C-alpha cells in the first residue's frame, strides 16, 4: 500500500529582498522628510539656486572696458504637489496574527513605493478610483530622434551641458540598461549606474517608455529623458492603522493599508528623445 503524502508544512515566508530595485531613490535627492507636517497636505515650493545657466567674462586689460556688468534674474520657483503611495492587504483573520499582517503590508510598501514615485515622475496615472494626473515629464522639450542608444546618450548629455544643468540625470526603462551596456555606455559606482562621463542613470521599474505627449513604445523605439536634479520628500513614518480597527467582523476579513505621502520636484528642465534600441544599431560587438 502506498504511503500517504504528508501534509504541507506551513512556513514563515523567506526573508524579502534586502533592498528595493535600483531606481530613482538611488539617484534623486531624498527621500527626505517634509520640513513641516503641513507640507504633507499642501506640498512644497522653493526657488532653486542652480538653474540659471548664464556665465559672463570681462576683460581687465587696457583700455578699460566701459559699461555695466550683466545681471541675471532669480530662478523661477518650482513646486511639488503631495500624493499618497499605498499598498494593501485583504485576508482572513484566521491563520495570521495582527502583527504579522501589519509587517507584511509594510514590507510590500517598502519594496514598491519607489515604483509608484517613478510612475508619478514619468507617465502619471489614470484611475477612476485613485485620481488622474499627468507625469512631471509631460512637458518635456523634444529632441530629434536618435538612431541608436549611443547617439541618444550623447544628445541628452550635451543638452544638459548646453543648458548649464548641474546634477543632471538620464532616465530610461529597465530594459534599456542591456542596450546601453552593449554600447559600452554603462559604468557602475557602488549601486549607482552612470555614463562614462559620470551622468547618473535611473532605470525605473515604474517608467513606461512613452513620449512626453503619450507616444507609445513599439518593437524598436522608445523614449529616454534627461532632467535636472529630482528631489523627493516623504512623511517620516509609514502609516499603518491598528489592525484590530480594520476588521470586518461580519466576515472576519482584514482590510489593511500601508501609506506614505510624497512630493517630487524636477529642477532646471526636462528633455525627451526617441531612440531606436535594436541591437543592430548600437555599434557595439
Image (cartoon, grey):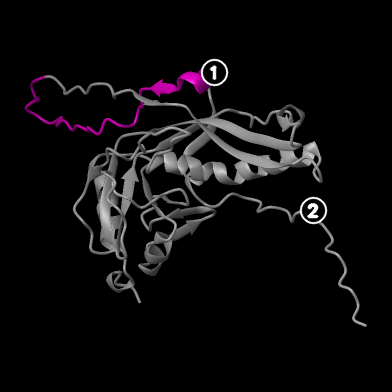
Q: Main secondary structure of the magenta part?
A: loop
> Is residue 25 shown to the viewer in this render?
no
Q: Is residue 281 above or below residue 47?
A: below
Q: Is residue 62 magenta?
A: yes
Q: Are marks 1 and 2 in contact (CB under 8 Å)?
A: no
Which image quarter: residue 47?
A: top left
Magenta stretch bounds: 38-67
Question: Residue 105, percent across and down?
Answer: 67, 41
In percent of the image, x 35 and y 36: which residue is there? 134
In percent of the image, x 13 and y 19: which residue is there? 68
Quarter of the picture containing the N terminus is bottom right
Question: Residue 84, percent across and down?
Answer: 52, 31
Mark 1 vs mark 2: in front: 2
Residue 22 versus residue 72: which sits nearer the camera?
Answer: 22
Return the residue at label 1: 36
Residue 197 versus residue 155: which sits nearer the camera?
Answer: 155
Q: Is residue 156 above or below residue 81?
A: below
Left or right: where does residue 230 sit relative to residue 5?
left
Q: Residue furthest front?
A: 250
> Is residue 5 shown to the viewer in this render?
yes
Q: Which badge, 1 or 2, is on the more N-terminal residue?
A: 2
Return the residue at label 2: 12
- How far separated are the C-alphas under marks 1 and 2? 39 Å
In percent of the image, x 35 and y 67: which residue is there? 183
Q: Is residue 1 above or below residue 84?
A: below
Question: Residue 247, percent across and down?
Answer: 73, 32
The local secondary structure at tag 1 comes to loop
In the image, which disc is placed on residue 11? none
Q: Residue furthest bottom?
A: 1
Quarter of the picture containing the C terminus is bottom left
Amino acid at each position: 500500500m502506498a504511503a500517504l503524502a504528508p501534509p504541507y508544512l506551513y512556513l514563515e515566508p523567506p526573508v524579502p529582498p534586502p533592498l528595493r530595485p535600483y531606481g530613482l531613490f538611488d539617484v534623486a535627492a531624498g527621500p527626505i522628510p517634509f520640513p513641516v507636517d503641513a507640507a504633507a497636505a499642501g506640498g512644497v515650493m522653493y526657488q532653486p539656486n542652480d538653474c540659471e545657466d548664464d556665465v559672463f567674462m570681462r576683460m581687465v586689460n587696457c583700455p578699460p572696458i566701459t559699461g555695466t556688468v550683466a545681471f541675471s534674474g532669480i530662478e523661477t520657483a518650482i513646486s511639488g504637489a503631495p500624493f499618497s503611495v499605498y499598498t494593501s492587504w485583504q485576508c482572513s483573520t484566521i491563520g495570521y496574527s495582527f502583527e504579522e499582517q501589519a509587517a507584511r503590508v509594510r514590507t510590500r510598501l517598502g519594496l514598491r513605493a519607489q515604483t509608484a514615485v517613478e510612475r508619478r515622475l514619468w507617465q502619471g496615472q489614470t484611475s477612476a478610483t485613485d485620481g488622474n494626473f499627468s507625469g512631471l515629464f509631460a512637458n518635456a522639450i523634444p529632441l530629434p530622434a536618435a538612431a541608436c542608444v549611443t547617439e541618444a546618450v550623447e544628445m541628452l548629455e550635451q543638452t544638459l551641458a548646453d543648458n548649464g544643468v548641474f546634477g543632471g540625470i538620464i532616465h530610461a526603462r529597465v530594459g534599456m540598461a542591456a542596450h546601453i551596456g552593449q554600447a559600452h555606455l554603462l559604468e557602475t559606482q557602488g549601486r549607482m549606474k552612470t555614463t562614462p562621463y559620470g551622468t547618473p542613470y535611473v532605470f525605473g521599474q515604474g517608467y513606461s517608455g512613452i513620449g512626453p505627449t503619450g507616444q507609445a513604445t513599439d518593437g524598436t523605439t522608445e523614449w529616454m529623458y534627461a532632467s535636472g536634479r529630482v528631489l523627493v520628500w516623504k512623511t517620516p513614518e509609514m502609516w499603518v492603522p491598528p489592525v484590530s480597527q480594520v476588521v470586518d467582523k461580519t466576515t472576519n476579513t482584514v482590510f489593511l493599508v500601508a501609506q506614505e505621502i510624497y512630493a517630487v520636484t524636477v529642477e532646471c528642465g526636462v528633455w525627451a528623445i526617441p531612440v531606436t534600441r535594436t541591437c543592430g544599431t548600437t555599434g557595439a560587438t
